[in-house]
């Protein structure tokens, strides 16, 4: 049996989560009584077929949707008791996001794109871009800080997105299909960066993915089907690594 961390190591706690969309005869129930914990210092992957509720669950954890029932605690804070303004402020300080489509601003350089979270926090532009350049160096893009997205490969664009997610030192990094649009070799490089640079003892990474090529980077895998958690397990490669 896998030994669980103590309560001080819990980053996210979900209990009895239900979520549906629509009403009446057109209503679709997406999540059914989901219970799950995510821990600091780990990569937790949510896996399962399309439509099983993975992205909806990720969106609830980020406070971008409200649950119909159940509780969501992130760093001990009850998201369901927060106002929308409080959730926005909480995300700004505590969460970083990495998406499949990169979502870079085409008219900004790599450094300017990576600096966006700091600019939103009203850090002076010169200081924010300088810190962004340092963060891009950490993900292997020291020579590309002045390049525009159109001048970057898909893997380079994803590394800019990772730098943008990390720059404000979030405690929770949320990733939705971060390697789905990348070839196998590039996806491996991106995951190596996320584990070696993005993962720290006081940060948690939650990744939604269909990409079984990267499962061995997980510390635990939560398998979902029809809006429920079927199992939570450690990949054999992770067990050997640890």
Image (tube, helix red, strand yellow):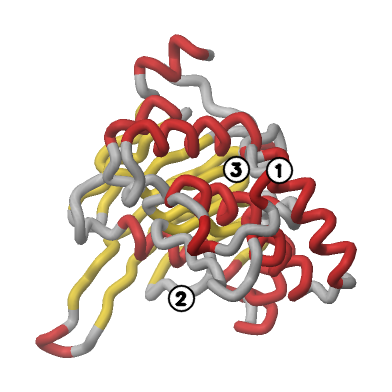
Whole-angstrom CA distance, mark 3 to mark 1, is 26 Å
**1 vs 2, front mark:** 1
Q: Earlier in the sequence, mark 1 or mark 2?
A: 2
Instruction: Please tell me which residue lies in front, 79 or 144.
Output: 144
- The quarter in which the N terminus is drawn is top left
Label 1 Cα crowd, 10 Å radius (few <14 / some 14-19 / many 20+) = some
- Graded by Cα atoms within 10 Å as few (under 14), some (14 to 19) or many (20 or more), the crowding at tag 2 reads some
Q: Spot the residue most to the left.
A: 25
Q: Judge whether 86 appears above or below 173 on screen.
A: below
Residue shown at the point (49%, 67%) measured from the top left: 103
The residue nearer to you, when weighing 92 against 123, is 123
Which residue does the numbered mark 2 point to in the structure image? 66
- Residue 240 lies in what quarter of the image? top left
Residue ID at (37%, 35%): 221
Check disc 2 and report its element: helix, strand or loop.
Answer: loop
Q: Is residue 20 above or below residue 41?
A: below
Residue under circle 1? 142
From the top left corner, tell me how far across and down residue 204 is, in percent. 60, 43
How many neighbours does mark 3 have within 10 angstroms: few (below 14), some (14-19), or many (20 or more)? many
Whether residue 29 is visible here, answered yes or no, is yes
Between marks 1 and 2, how big is the CA–CA gap? 40 Å
The residue under label 3 is 204
**Could you tell whether 26 is left or right of 235 in the image?**
left
Q: Residue furthest top?
A: 240
Q: For mark 3, give the secondary structure.
A: strand
């Amino acid at each position: 049996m896998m030994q669980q961390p103590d309560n001080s190591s819990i980053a996210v706690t979900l209990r009895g989560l239900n979520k549906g969309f629509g009403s009446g005869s057109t209503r679709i129930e997406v999540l059914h009584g989901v219970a799950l914990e995510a821990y600091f210092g780990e990569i937790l992957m949510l896996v399962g077929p399309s439509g099983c509720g993975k992205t909806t669950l990720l969106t609830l954890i980020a406070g971008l949707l409200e649950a119909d029932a159940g509780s969501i605690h992130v760093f001990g804070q009850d998201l369901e008791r927060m106002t929308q303004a409080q959730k926005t402020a909480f995300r700004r300080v505590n969460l970083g996001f990495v998406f499949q489509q990169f979502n870079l601003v085409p008219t900004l350089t790599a450094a300017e794109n990576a600096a966006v979270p700091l600019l939103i926090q009203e850090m002076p532009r010169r200081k924010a871009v300088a810190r962004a350049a340092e963060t891009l160096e950490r993900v292997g893009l020291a020579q590309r800080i002045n390049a525009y997205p159109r001048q970057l490969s898909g893997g380079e664009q994803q590394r800019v997105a990772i730098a943008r997610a990390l720059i404000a030192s979030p405690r929770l990094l949320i990733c939705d299909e971060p390697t789905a649009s990348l070839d196998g070799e590039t996806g491996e490089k991106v995951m190596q960066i996320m584990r070696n640079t993005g993962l720290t003892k006081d940060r948690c990474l939650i990744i939604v993915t269909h990409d079984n090529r990267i499962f061995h980077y997980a510390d635990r895998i939560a398998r979902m089907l029809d809006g429920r958690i079927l199992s939570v397990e450690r990949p054999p490669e992770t067990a050997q690594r640890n």
